[in-house]
Image: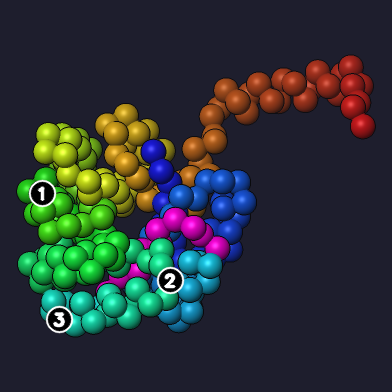
Amino acid sequence: MKFFVDTADFDAIAELHELGMVDGVTTNPSLVKKSGRDILEVTKQICDLIDGPVSAEVTATDADTMIAEGRKLGEIAENIAIKVPLTWDGLKACKVLSDEGRMVNVTLCFSANQALLAAKAGASFISPFIGRLDDIALDGMEVIEDIRTIYDNYGFETEVLAASIRSVNHVLECARIGADVATVPPAVIKSLVNHPLTDKGLATFLADIEAAKIKIL
């Protein structure tokens, strides 16, 4: 499973990139706002660092303006994936932009039926929002599983990009189901390394090292 980093914080992306943990990046207007940066400036900086897809989201809601904004964002770099919302206008924009050979990430997906439409409109990525489904007492993982099954049934090339991931269990379940990508906040990626038995074992090793006065350097 590929990891996309869900942030517009360049320093956080760079830190994970050094460890080989970054296959791509997803941003949105809310994340750009948190960064305090100009959307075109920060997106260009990220694209210069990351070889994989970098999602940048349109701000319009009508198809014609989404298409124009998508083309503008696409000028930033070849690895831009244009994010459009899963609305009827968003699907129209997706069809036009994908037909032009651009990567399109259709976001704000909450059902397998929506994902089916996005795939037929030529989406490169579909972004089902797990955490937000969980918030309203629905099972976000069921949606991921349904989309995976439907796409496999019919050979759709659209990649399942699990989004709104909030916990290490979300990451684990996405990997089990077979999501192509998980877009994950930096803090959650870092937390994947944590386990109480690792901490306990390390504490034991350190105590034995001190007791035996072991030195390597």
Q: Are marks 3 and 1 in contact (CB under 8 Å)?
A: no
Dot placed on the residue nearer the N-terminal end, 3 or 1: 3
Above or below — where is 204 with respect to 152?
A: above
SS at circle 1:
helix
Residue 27, located in which quarter of the rendered image? bottom left
Above or below — where is 65 with respect to 97?
A: below
Q: Which residue is mark 3?
A: 64
Specify whether residue 167 is painted magenta.
no
Amino acid type, label 1: Leu
Question: Disc 2 to disc 1, how far (Cα)?
Answer: 28 Å
Extent of the magenta region: 49-58
Amino acid type, label 2: Ala
Residue 54, given in percent of the width and then of the height, sits at: 40, 62
SS at circle 3:
helix
Q: Is residue 52 left or right of residue 121?
A: right
Q: What residue sits 48% from the left and 73% below the top?
A: 44
Q: Tell me the tag on residue 73.
A: none
Residue 35, given in percent of the width and then of the height, sits at: 48, 72
Q: What residue sits 17% from the left and 35% below the top?
A: 152
Local packing at callout 1 (Cα closer than 10 Å; few below 14, some 14-19, many 20+) is some
Q: Quadrant of the N terminus?
A: top left
Q: What residue sits 35% from the left and 73% below the top?
A: 74
Q: Which residue is mark 2?
A: 77
Amino acid type, label 3: Asp
Q: Which of these two is toward me, 85 or 166?
A: 85
Choose mark 2 or mark 1, whichever is in front: 2
Q: Is residue 158 left or right of residue 75?
A: left
Dot placed on the residue nearer the N-terminal end, 2 or 1: 2
Q: Which residue is mark 1?
A: 116
Local packing at callout 3 (Cα closer than 10 Å; few below 14, some 14-19, many 20+) is some
Question: Disc 3 to disc 1, how far (Cα)?
Answer: 23 Å
